[in-house]
Amino acid sequence: MLKYDFLVIGSGIAGLSYALKVAQKLPDAKIAIVTKSDENESNTKYAQGGIAVVLDQIKDSYESHIKDTLKAGDGLCNEAIVRAVVTEGPDRFDELVQWGVDFDKKNAGEYDFGLEGGHSKNRILHHKDITGAEIEKRLLRQVHMLSNVKLFSQYFAVDLITQHQLVEDFKGTSKNIQCFGAYIFNADTKKIETFSAKTTMLASGGIGQVYQNTTNPIIATGDGIAMAYRAKAAIENMEFIQFHPTAMYNPLESPSFLISEAVRGFGALLRNKSGETFMHLYDDRNELASRDIVSRAIDSELKKSGDDFVYLDCRHINQADFKRHFPNILQKVNELGIDLAKDMIPVVPAAHYLCGGINVDENGQTGVKNLYACGECTNTGLHGANRLASNSLLEALVFAHRSFVKSVEKLDETRAPGHIPDWNEEGTSEPKELILITHNRKELQILMNDYVGIIRTDERLHRAAKRLHILYEETEDLYKKSKISPQIIELRNMLSVAYIIIQQSLARKENRGGFYKA
């Protein structure tokens, strides 16, 4: 058994900034970060647009940012949380700069603030069109300089350790459940190791891979949410899936390549296959409407025309300016033979961001004692029914800081258990056919794409629930018989996440933000 003071599951902006602060504050504490892929592979890495922060109170204001966030959240935001995140944002941004993150500046040395859909002011700070990758690189560099942090790559969290594993036939409620660490699958040895921890932080990212079309990397399978669900933590607002309006249409590529929101903020226009603009028919903000509105508008246009995609038109934009702001996007479209001076980019909505997740309080604490959660896997109250563009990196930073403050404060109150049983895989064997897992994964993704997409109906949701139950029974039977592997864990987690999305979609009666039921 490996014993730590803090166990962090996930190596994106939430997990790394939390671990970094804890390690610097408590140099004698032992901190483990586990990540199921390479250390830099996370949803953070793929964040193109940037981070929304109010730095200039003359040209912008906290109240304006708060108002924009509340409007995007469509009445379901926690206003106190919104206010806290917005007003604490500048301090958290300054920390990123101190850690070496490089944000773009104009020739005069002032920050180059971008504009994205739903924002009334230019307030998006960015590093070209690879902001997340820049943040990820700099945070990892800082973490590697700390002697009291150990980062485990290719270590896959299987389950949280609670009284359910420690006490036979434990019948406790969520109010008295505690977390004591996690069982972690070592991909190198193929063994499950026991990580004991006084405090556990879930920073495991999103759920996009539950869908067939998604901008999320292949690791985004909702593992943290599924583990928290099994540990009896409360999970809410899972029906609010944000579909990014402009993922590049390329059926041969998965995940879908993201064309940043900032490109429309830069002046790009949406056109149907006939070359006509259409956003003015749906919202007076045109291309700068919030993502849910733009995604539904595109979905409506595609249903009317029978086409597979619409176009993003950048032909009128100064090409030198585009290259300076979006070099990564330009390189990608050029590789596909698209000349932005002459050609338009085919785009289609794709699952992009989860607005709900594990319920946490204002300090990132879940309902399970000693268990914190941060980032996209959480339901903080910031996003409500729909996330405002570029608020996610901000949320992760603010809640990582708040979780750090609270968990360090409470460390002396927490105690790891004396004995944790090893993972029991008695009676299991290697699965004879991986096709049983891969087929069910693909079937789940198609089911969610077709039945639980941008616009839903009760009939389709009920059909999805019936088919999901069959997939669940097949997978649970296989799980009980099989030795643990990343493939079976991911499928099991994805099924749990899909179940929650469907059930909470059926329960939701009114259309709000990213949720729309016809």
Image (cartoon, grey):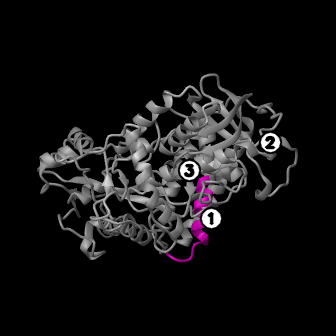
Give SS at disc 3: loop
**Residue 351 in view:** no
- The mark lying in front, picked from 3 and 1, is 3
Give SS at disc 1: helix
Kindly identify the amino acid type of the residue bearing the numbered disc 3: Cys
**Which residue: 74% across, 28% down?**
1
What is the C-alpha distance between the residues marked 2 and 3? 24 Å
- Residue at the disc numbered 2: 165
Left or right of residue 22, residue 169 in this image: right
- Residue at the disc numbered 3: 374
Task: Tell me where residue 105 appears, x and y as whole percent.
Answer: 24, 46
Specify which label sits upstream in the sequence, 1 or 2.
2
Kindly identify the amino acid type of the residue bearing the numbered disc 1: Gln
Which contiguous range is marked in magenta?
Answer: 497-511
- The mark lying in front, picked from 1 and 2, is 2
**Which residue: 53% across, 37% down?**
20
Above-or-below relation of 370 to 261: above
Numbered disc total? 3
Kindly identify the amino acid type of the residue bearing the numbered disc 2: Gln
Answer whether residue 235 is magenta in the image.
Answer: no
- Residue at the disc numbered 1: 503
Specify which label sits upstream in the sequence, 2 or 3.
2
Give SS at disc 2: helix
Pick the front one: 72 or 24:
24
